[in-house]
Amino acid sequence: PTPKDTDMELPNAATNSGDKKFALPVDSENKATEFRIYSAAAPHMRAFHLSWVSFFACFVSTFAAPPLLPIIRDNLNLTSTDIGNAGIAAVTGAVFARITMGTACDLFGPRLASAALILLTAPAVFCSAMANSPVSFLLVRFFTGFSLATFVSTQFWMSSMFSAPVVGTANGVAGGWGNLGGGATQLIMPLVFSLIRDIGVTKFTAWRIAFSIPALFQTLSAFAIFFLGQDLPDGNYSRLQKSGDKHKDNFKQVLYHAVTNYRGWILALTYGYCFGVELTVDNIIAQYFYDRFNVSLHTAGIIAASFGLANLFSRPGGGLLSDVVAKKFGMRGRLWTLWIVQMLGGLFCILLGKVGSLGVSVAVMLIFSVFVQAACGLTFGVVPFVSRRSLGVISGMTGGGGNVGAVLTQVIFFRGSRYSAETGITLMGVMIICCTLPLLFIFFPQWGGLFCGPSSKGITEEEYYMSEWNSTEKDKGFHKASLKFAHNSRSERGKKVDSALTPSNETPPTHV
Amino acid sequence: MKSHLLTAFLLLFCLAQTGDGGVLFSSLPQTLVVTASIKQGQVLIAGEDSITLTWGLNQSFVGRTDESYKEVKVKLCYAPISQVDRKWRKTVNDLSKDKTCQFIMVNKPYQKLDQSFKWSVEKEVPTGTYFVRAYAYDSAGEEVAYGQNSDAKKSSNLFEVQGISGRHLSLDVASVCFSAFALVSLIGFFLVENNKKKRSTDN
């Protein structure tokens, strides 16, 4: 649908009257076909910067406690079990919140959905200053953790603003730079804590005051999203739904087609063992270095930070690698690369638990972080192709599966005193390897899987994606967007594709 | 390429090594006598209360037992009950890795005569159950003897410290106000959006 000039009043008047002019080149959907990282032009790049910064803020808040645990555990008289439970609680909330967020984005648009979630979780961060027992500590971490569902709104918003050739990069950079927050917080919180301590505040009060920084940052980002952001290149949802430019899909059908697609479940499991592992490490690594190698709080924070900071390039790199490999080898290349990279992540994790000297441990941790985060980026190189109609819910399921992996791993290995931290890390590596094996079972009839080529029945992309629509819906023409996408996805066959792809035929997403 | 990766992997594996050890606690003679002025079941308030410590050589050890003793550090140590499920307070025989005694109460040069000190419980001492142990150090700074006010099982003469909460009324009020502000802003956002929606349908 082409934008109607007459009733378009964008809240940010970045366009001239009459013809719409965007700062970036756009396709027929007005989605940007280029990704210019240094630009903040409305609406596309501005949406990118708003989404990654707010997601970053949520990560900072969710993992603000771990680097200060050596102080907090003495103040609140916590045991290892208490600490483990709080760490699990921090990532549990987002399991369901992520799945719900996909729906919320569909109903209200990513701008309102993410601003609302951020403001609803900000009180938990402010009230962290009042925690005075293991139970209250667990509760603040639990409610703060819901904010990690902004991952889904980030990916959704990028998919709405950027067209297929750059959507992988946009998603990968937005996701990766948001995840940076988990690393940055390990630097920020000890620094803020020591500044407050230096002016003479006792340490059991200083950590409480320190939490105001992530809380304020998170609140400000919600304001920025609300006032500066925009759901779609053409405007906000509320306006577009009224004018009939956006068709609302059937929620039950969308959910059904997501839940019955086994590939979504496999990817949810494997994402639990790259992203879930990343969340677990964010929770335990500062304490690990502090306790095992007797470094200062400050040093432990720096080491822990470097794990998360690798996200600057490793997750985007994974997404980029997926696209590069797909050019020659198609979907099979994407799957193989994901499998290899994630397996290597598991191997380095096993090694990390075994090394006993500080220097080697840090080096192994860095290598491990690159592989594990690249695997996250590679996963979301496959996810957009699992379903077209139910992309939002599949993304939410995969994202939620990431958090489930974090919950499981912490419950089994990092709670209480059954395993020492180093044994837990090694066993986590073994679990990564076991839980990456299911990738072998992913099979796309039109492209193949790890060990098989495409189905001999000659199933096409169109047949695969059309199977998500019934004849009544096809009569009404709802499937047309999926049809376009199916045609464009022929590039996933790999180099053998000789049919001309029309790059201007970009896919308008069916907002799910 | 693959063989390089494997070699690097194996090399890293072989480089895994453990650190050097320190003095072993089990090798230290218990030649010092330490007492602390505590009553049975007393709870000390951090930042307020104080106790008197005394330490000195056990007079039953004659001769030149204490020739190498140059320095004494009296430390506040966690009782077993405060170590349960808390690996960061673990008792390890190797004193360079031992985390039982994390607070130095007094640090003085060794003297033949008994010494005493009035120790105020510092504000930052965490809540827990404790006992007192004194280590004697030689000129190289290594432990050569010890004494403690509790028995070998660390079950007698224990005392509790009630740490500060770290909370302040002003902090609590600020937290609640900012939380309320965030929630009110959210309601405001929805109202603004609804108004915009209404205005667009009226157009």
Image (cartoon, rainbow, N blue to C red):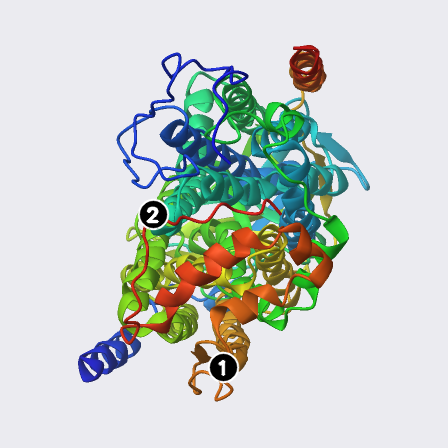
For the residues marked 1 and 2, what is the alpha-carbon distance in whole angstroms?
34 Å
Secondary structure at badge 2 equals loop
User: Viewer-proximal residue, A299 or A502?
Assistant: A502
Residue where numbered disc 1 is placed: A440
Reading the chain from its start, which is encountered first: label 1 or label 2?
Answer: 1
Give the x, y percent position of residue B119. 58, 30
Q: Chain of mark 1?
A: A
Q: Chain of mark 2?
A: A
Q: Are marks 1 and 2 in contact (CB under 8 Å)?
A: no
Under mark 1, the amino acid is Leu
Under mark 2, the amino acid is Ser
Q: Is residue B75 above or below residue A465?
A: above
Secondary structure at badge 1 equals helix
User: Viewer-proximal residue, A123 or B16?
Assistant: A123
- Rendered image: mark on residue A504: 2
Badge 2 crowding class, 10 Å Cα cut-off, few under 14, some 14 to 19, many 20 or more, is few
User: Which quarter of the figure has residue A31?
Assistant: top left
